[in-house]
């Protein structure tokens, strides 16, 4: 069961990945468009993602499109943009109930596939080559709201602010959804022009997970989906700058809030595909990735300073990010403990037992990911992005092979870059 | 052991009630890697007045105690942290407390039997000390502060406080920093002895497991623990008038986008079983008819710039209380509240359209099938349904039998003008 049964077929300008399985009650289809993360395109892509899923030429209002989806037993057409290191991935997906569980016979699968292709290839645009004005204004407003909403979610705000400060001047500092300034300037023509460019230049992968017949899908796709070129464009290996830290930065900001948000950013200098990548995963797990980790045990359980104190790897960028919520007055104490625990990691102050626990949980989380169609797609697409044809059993072997020295090596080359603290305001 | 087969869904549920009263349910999921198990007591935040085990006098306990107890269950008599044990066995553990239940859970892809025993054993082995109770107050204090900064949480609880005059559903599940300061280990033992008897609990296991083996394992485990059959639990809730406590309130917070949530307090409570299922599904279907993405109302609100894609609706029904809630981010909370209420009134004056009902029904069927991909959904929802004497898997058949007349009645009864209330989060 430790394998994903993935069939890869080169089609007209994209690669089709079919994972045939009868585990799920659904069929999930995701189209991924990958491009470099760039200031000039990031906001356009964010807006485009939502324009494509909200109406089509055939169903020019959201309401009409929604009725079609509802009639397909509540199929959901969704889109998103994600930052994966120095890539920006635009995904558009449809998730449908598998018709074999329905009493009424219907062709949900075929219709869903058609709808996905329609959303991508037959957008709601005018003769003059611009997105429909009404839909455009509506989605522009929605994106503005999404950008503003970050400020209202203080945990997310603090995480974004840390990256702003830490990666200033690097593409990674760009926000997934772009900026308000760029958004205000966009016109329906700009975005349509960019749409045409995206179809021409992006690397495209289509994932289909569910109990499907590969031959049927392929023959449908031959007439349905093609991008004006014959070959699939591979994702270019972009060389990111691996920045060395000279001196850590300390940033404090005040808002009228109840709890301080303490975020730390480290540079591990390890990205997906590197020889030390498995060790960096074990390192993060030991430090703050799991409930048996240093941060959980010391910041939370021993010192009672926080409810959450966790770390996670930003694997495509080579960062490790720490997040915690504390009393404002406990800033120094919390920071001291985090520094102390980090030093303990560099000195190898962890037991073999802790290493084993962490490995067991890392393997467990990969295996668990195979039980959700979306995680399966994430896992497979990660390989495409890292140009690394990962075989699960090899990954597990890699994790098993990580030794104490590797972990210490990662810990020692990991550098604290920025400490960001969102604190309260003095109250009268 | 009894077996229930749901042919259309291709699922089978195995059940056994042990001599000590514990209900065990197992749902085998072939092809899955992960086993997910919940061990749930029918005891939540609202159960703050009761007759303690073997006592005649009523006891009122501090707010937030069920949740506090959830945190403290993870302490073991030998001082070993349960998270460490689960970690060693490759499992991720967690717990949550709702208004009416407290659930302990793990997921793992290996050592399933060991993990199951660990789960059941740790929940059946309290180890509260004055010291570890004090220590937890700092941690939970930070959990409360985290929610204090979360505008969506404040909005939701603001609305419930608007609705209820006396019922403890209006109290935040975690309590307040002041109320948890009063909690002692004696309180925790009283609550524990009263509510954690196996006869008040359900164990649900979903994953690639052999039902017979699981049931035998737990049966043996329980036989050794000497639980005797126990008396019924007596709980008391204050008298709750039909009318809402406040028609309208608002809370200033450091947000950029205001929020508005409105809802109706259900007048008739104490439904159970099939009656509750029909009622719950009816209100949910009506909310979809009123404000689903395909409706005229949704389109109007979007066109008027009053809502964005954060808009959502839900209906919560338990034995003791029930309410609907709908709203989201908005630039004009007062106007949105007025429009929502007017739309409901308008709908009540018109006959329900049969075709629209069919579409909403289909959508609901599809979304139920999608949810069945998730072992977490199955375990937690099945348990909630069981506590209310309903059957999760009869959702589909019940949906098909809901009539227009029934929906019309529920529309007029639940959405009662006098039971309407609104809560807003506004920019500070």
Image (cartoon, coloured by chain):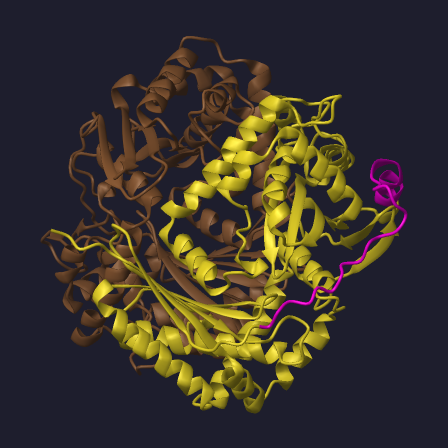
Chain colours: A yellow, B brown
Query: Does any portion of residue A232 appear in the rendered image?
Result: yes
Query: Does any portion of residue A25 appear in the rendered image?
Result: no
Q: Quadrant of the N terminus of chain A?
A: bottom right
Q: Is residue A287 above or below residue B384?
A: below
Residue at position x 49%, y 53% from top?
B379
x and y, in percent, of residue A104 in the image: 71, 29
Q: Which residues are magenta?
A: A216-242
- Is residue A220 inside the magenta stretch? yes
Determine the image quadrant of residue B329: top left
Q: Is residue B353 above or below residue B89?
A: above
Determine the image quadrant of residue B77: bottom left
- Is residue B385 inside the magenta stretch? no
Going by the image, does A190 lie left or right of A231?
left
Going by the image, does B251 lie left or right of A132?
left
Q: Is residue B55 above or below residue A277?
A: above
**Magenta span: chief secondary structure:** loop
Determine the image quadrant of residue A332: bottom left
Nearest the viewer among A427 and A381 is A427
x and y, in percent, of residue A279 in the image: 58, 80
Going by the image, does A181 lie left or right of B159?
right
């Amino acid at each position: 069961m430790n394998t994903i049964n993935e069939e890869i077929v080169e089609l007209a300008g994209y690669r089709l990945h079919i994972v045939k399985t009868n585990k799920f009650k659904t069929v999930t289809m995701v189209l991924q468009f990958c491009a470099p993360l760039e200031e000039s395109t990031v906001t356009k892509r964010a807006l485009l993602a939502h324009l494509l899923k909200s109406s089509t030429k055939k169903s020019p209002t959201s309401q009409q499109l929604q009725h079609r989806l509802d009639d397909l037993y509540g199929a959901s057409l969704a889109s998103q943009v994600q930052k994966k290191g120095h890539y920006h991935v635009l995904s558009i997906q449809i998730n449908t109930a598998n018709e074999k569980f329905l009493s009424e016979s219907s062709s949900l699968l075929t219709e869903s596939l058609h709808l996905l292709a329609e959303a991508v290839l037959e957008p709601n645009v005018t003769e003059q080559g611009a997105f429909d004005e009404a839909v455009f204004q509506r989605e522009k407003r929605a994106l503005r709201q999404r950008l503003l909403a970050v400020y209202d979610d203080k945990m997310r705000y603090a995480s974004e602010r840390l990256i702003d400060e830490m990666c200033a001047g690097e593409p990674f500092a760009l926000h997934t959804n772009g900026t308000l300034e760029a958004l205000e300037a966009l016109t329906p023509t700009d975005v349509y022009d960019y749409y045409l460019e995206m179809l021409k230049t992006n690397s495209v992968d289509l994932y289909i997970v569910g109990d499907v017949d590969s031959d049927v899908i392929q023959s449908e796709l031959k007439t349905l989906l093609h991008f004006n070129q014959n070959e699939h464009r591979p994702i270019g290996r972009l060389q990111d700058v691996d920045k060395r830290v000279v001196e850590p930065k300390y940033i404090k900001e005040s808002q009228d809030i109840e709890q301080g948000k303490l975020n730390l950013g480290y540079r591990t200098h390890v990205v997906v595909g590197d020889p030390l990548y498995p060790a960096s995963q074990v390192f993060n797990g030991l430090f703050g990735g799991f409930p048996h980790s240093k941060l959980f045990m010391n910041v939370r359980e021993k010192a009672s300073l926080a409810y959450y104190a966790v770390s996670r790897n930003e694997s495509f960028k080579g960062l490790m990010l720490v997040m915690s919520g504390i009393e404002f007055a406990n800033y120094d104490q919390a920071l001291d403990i985090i520094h102390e625990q980090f030093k303990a990691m560099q000195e190898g102050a962890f037991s073999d037992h802790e290493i084993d626990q962490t490995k067991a949980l890392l393997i467990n989380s990969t295996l668990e990911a195979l039980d959700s169609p979306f995680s399966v797609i994430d896992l497979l697409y990660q390989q495409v992005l890292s140009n690394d044809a990962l075989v699960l059993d090899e990954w597990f072997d890699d994790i098993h092979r990580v030794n104490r020295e590797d972990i210490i090596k990662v810990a020692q080359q990991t550098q604290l870059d920025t400490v960001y603290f969102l604190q309260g305001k003095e109250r009268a | 052991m009894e077996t229930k087969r749901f042919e259309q869904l291709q699922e089978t549920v195995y059940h056994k009630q042990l001599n000590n009263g514990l209900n065990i349910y197992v749902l085998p999921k072939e092809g899955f890697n992960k086993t997910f198990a919940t061990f749930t007591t029918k005891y939540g935040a609202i159960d703050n007045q009761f007759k303690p085990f073997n006592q005649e006098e009523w006891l009122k306990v501090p707010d937030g105690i069920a949740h506090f107890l959830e945190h403290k269950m993870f302490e073991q008599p030998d001082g070993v942290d349960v998270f460490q044990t689960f970690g060693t066995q490759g499992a991720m553990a967690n717990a949550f407390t709702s208004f009416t239940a407290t659930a302990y859970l793990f997921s793992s892809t290996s050592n399933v039997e060991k993990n199951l025993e660990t789960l059941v054993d740790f929940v059946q082995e309290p180890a509260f000390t004055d010291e570890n109770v004090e220590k937890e107050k700092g941690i939970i204090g930070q959990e409360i502060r985290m929610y204090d900064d979360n505008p969506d949480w404040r909005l939701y609880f603001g609305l419930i406080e608007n609705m209820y005059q006396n019922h403890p559903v209006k109290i935040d599940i975690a309590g307040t920093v002041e109320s948890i300061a009063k909690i002692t280990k004696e309180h925790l033992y009283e609550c524990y002895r009263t509510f954690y008897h196996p006869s008040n609990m359900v164990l649900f296991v979903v994953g690639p497991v052999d039902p017979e083996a699981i049931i035998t394992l737990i049966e043996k485990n329980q036989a050794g623990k000497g639980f005797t059959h126990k008396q019924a639990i007596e709980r008391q809730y204050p008298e709750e008038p039909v009318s809402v406590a406040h028609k309208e309130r608002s809370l200033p917070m450091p947000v950029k986008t205001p929020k508005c949530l409105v809802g109706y307090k259900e007048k008739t409570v104490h439904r159970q079983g099939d009656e509750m299922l029909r009622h719950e599904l009816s209100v949910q279907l009506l909310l979809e008819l009123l404000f689903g993405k395909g409706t005229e109302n949704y389109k109007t609100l979007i066109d008027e710039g009053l809502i964005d894609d954060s808009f959502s609706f839900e209906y919560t029904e338990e034995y003791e209380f029930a309410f609907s809630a709908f709203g989201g981010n908005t630039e004009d909370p007062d106007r949105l509240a007025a429009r929502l209420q007017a739309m409901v009134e308008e709908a009540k004056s018109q006959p329900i359209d049969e075709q629209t009902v069919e579409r909403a029904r289909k959508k609901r069927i599809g979304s139920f099938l999608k949810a069945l991909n998730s072992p977490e959904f199955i375990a937690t929802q099945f348990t909630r349904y069981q506590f209310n004497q309903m059957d999760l898997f009869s959702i589909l058949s019940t949906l098909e039998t809901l009539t227009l007349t029934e929906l019309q009645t529920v529309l007029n009864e639940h959405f009662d003008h006098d039971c309407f209330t609104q809560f807003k989060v506004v920019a500070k």
